[in-house]
Amino acid sequence: MIGSRWKAACVQGHYYVVLLQVAIKIIDKSQLDSANLQKVYREVDIMKQLDHPHIIKLYQVRHSYSLSAETQLCVL
């Protein structure tokens, strides 16, 4: 684990598509209210549009599901 803060954890991983080591931000959406969840989705939308050498590149976003609800958002 690289770090943990605000209903999220950051772990190191390997993204096989681009053959790079990446940081994976895992957000527990069940702990967020609707206003904060909208902020997370807005952050992801903005990160998708950015392409600059001094800003971390967003490669992929995945949702994980449990039997009852969508529980995690993973940002690569």
Image (spheres, grey):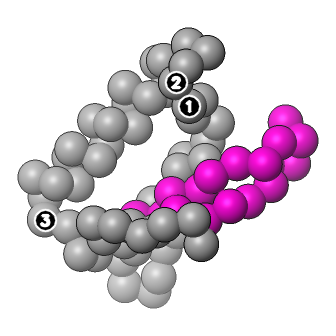
Label placed on residue 33: 3
> Mark 3 to mark 2: distance in Å?
28 Å
Classify 23 as above or below 10: above
Q: Are marks 2 and 1 in contact (CB under 8 Å)?
A: yes
In the rendered image, residue 12, in percent from the top left (x then y), is placed at: 68, 61
Label placed on residue 56: 1
Q: Secondary structure at mark 2?
A: loop
Asked where in the image residue 24 lies, by quadrant, the reply is bottom right
Q: In the image as oriented, which residue stretches furthest toward the top?
A: 52
Say if the magenta span includes residue 59: no
Q: In the image as oriented, which residue stretches furthest toward the bottom?
A: 67
In the rendered image, residue 33, in percent from the top left (x then y), is placed at: 13, 65
Of tags 1 and 3, the one toward the viewer is 1
Residue in view at x 34 percent, y 67 percent:
5
Residue in view at x 42 percent, y 70 percent:
4
- Indicate left or right for 41 with 63 as reference: left
> Mark 1 to mark 3: distance in Å?
26 Å
Label placed on residue 55: 2
Residue in view at x 20 percent, y 46 percent:
38
Residue in view at x 40 percent, y 37 percent:
44
Say if the magenta span includes residue 26: yes
In the rendered image, residue 20, in percent from the top left (x then y), is placed at: 83, 42
Q: Decide whether the magenta segment is chiefly helix, strand or loop.
A: strand
Q: What residue range appears in magenta? A: 10-27
Asked if residue 35 can be seen in this view, the reply is yes
Label placed on residue 11: none
Amino acid type at circle 1 is: Ile
